[in-house]
Every structure is written in C-alpha cells, then in structure tokens.
Amino acid sequence: MLRVGKAVDPKSRFDHLLKVIASQRFLKKQGLGNEVPFFICPYPADEAFAMEGMRASLVNQLETRGVRAFEINLYDLSVALLRERGIWDEILAAEATISKDELKELLQGVLDPETHLVPEIGARLSRQEFDVLFLSGVGEVYPFIRSHNVLNNLQSTAKEKPTVMFFPGTYTHGLATGASLDLFGILHDDKYYRAFNIMHYEV
C-alpha cells in the first residue's frame, strides 16, 4: 500500500497498479466486504498525457502476466454513440450557435448514462473476454457526463469483474463529508462512496 496523503510519482503508481491488478486477490475481488468491485485511480490532472502512455504500458504488461484488461474511453464511446445515431455533425454545427448550457443539456440528453451510455458499455462487455475493465476519458466528457453517474448506473452491469476508473483529480473520504470525487482537484460536488481507492489497496 502507498502511504495515504503522500504524493505518488508516476513510476511508483505504475508499479503499484501492476502489482495490484495482476494479483489473484484483486482479480478474485477479495477484501471488498461484498461491495461492488469498483476502484478509482486518482492522478494529477497535469499528468493526463503521461497517463495515456502509462495505461497502454500497463495493459501490455498485464497481458504478459495473463491478465486481460479491456479499456473503454468515455469520450471515444460518446463520439461513437453520437455518430451511430447520426447526430454528430448536427451537434458540431449547433455548437457555434447555442450557449454552453444548451449544448450541455443536449449532450446530457443523448448521452444519458442510464438510458444510453451504460447499456452500450454492457453490450461491449458482453462481446469481450476480459479480467479487468479500465474506464478512461473522464476529464474529456465533463461536464455532460459525470463520473459518479456512470459508476452508479454501472453497479448492476459491471459487477462480475473489477473496474478501474482513471480519474484526473482526487478521491477523498471524510467522516463529515463522505466520499468525494474531486475532478481536476477543484470540483468538489461528485459524491460517490462505493468505490475503493486502488492506491490504498494491499496485496
């Protein structure tokens, strides 16, 4: 386990993730107290580009150990859904003529996690053999998709295998405030308490 509250350098983060995710304890969902096997991997928002490369390396290293990681990027998934529905070009054209709030409302409607996003994630999972699900692209889809909404709706869809959400910000627990997903380290309004901070998971 990495020390709580201590800044984690990229190499230590990578080594910890590889050790944890490749472990049978993690893959068999042990030590979770019957909670859903959801994990948050928080990282500084300014390390987002480096995290892209690290995640690709992590997938490759896990594969050499016989662990199949399946990644779903929420931004790429959103674009694919909009294209499939034939409204991608319309939204691009409308972006220049409507307010940000109107655009946000439009996207929240067509990419609602409960009715559109999570069912598509479920369909993709059903077609894929995997041991752990990686969710990325969280920062890119803010504010029209909120991480806690995705996790809440995924609870019945992705509970058979561990899920790791890569989160550009912090995931904190407090007795007074509960658990909070603080996107970019500054937005403190996404309450979600059922996930575990993977940086604190021991093997």
Image: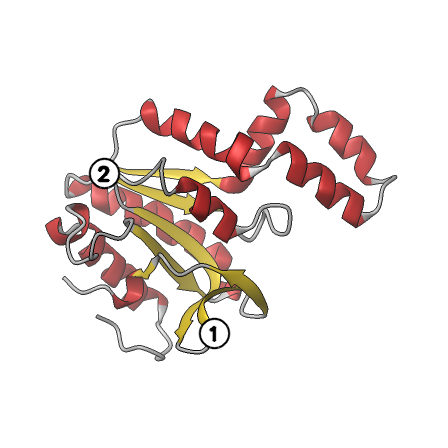
Q: Position of residue 101 (x, y in %)?
A: 78, 49
Which secondary structure lies at badge 2? Answer: loop
Q: Position of residue 88 (x, y in %)?
A: 69, 27
Which secondary structure lies at badge 1? Answer: loop
**Which of the two residues, 50 or 157, is positioned nearer the viewer here?**
157
**Which of the two residues, 153 or 18, is positioned nearer the viewer here?**
153
| Residue 188: quadrant of the picture | bottom right
Q: Looking at the picture, which amino acid does disc 1 mark?
A: Thr
Name the residue at 53% across, 65% down. 46
Q: Position of residue 167 (x, y in %)?
A: 45, 57
CA–CA distance in space, label 1 to label 2: 33 Å
**Which of the two residues, 160 or 136, is positioned nearer the viewer here?**
160
Q: Looking at the picture, which amino acid does disc 2 mark?
A: Asp
Q: Nearer the viewer, mark 1 or mark 2?
A: 1
Name the residue at 60% across, 35% down. 111
Q: Which residue is mark 2?
A: 131
In the displayed structure, does residue 129 sit left or right of residue 168? left
| Residue 157: quadrant of the picture | top left
Image quarter where the N terminus lies is: bottom left
Name the residue at 58% across, 49% down. 140
Q: Which residue is mark 1?
A: 177
Q: Residues within 10 Å of mark 1 (few under 14, many from 20)?
A: few
Find out whether the residues at labels 1 and 2 contact each other: C-beta distance under 8 Å. Answer: no
Q: Position of residue 11 (x, y in %)?
A: 30, 65
Q: Is residue 89 above or below residue 57?
A: above
Q: Is residue 1 above or below residue 23?
A: below
Question: How many numbered marks have been drawn onto this rendered protein structure?
Answer: 2
Q: Is residue 141 above or below residue 123?
A: below
Q: Residues within 10 Å of mark 2 (few under 14, many from 20)?
A: some
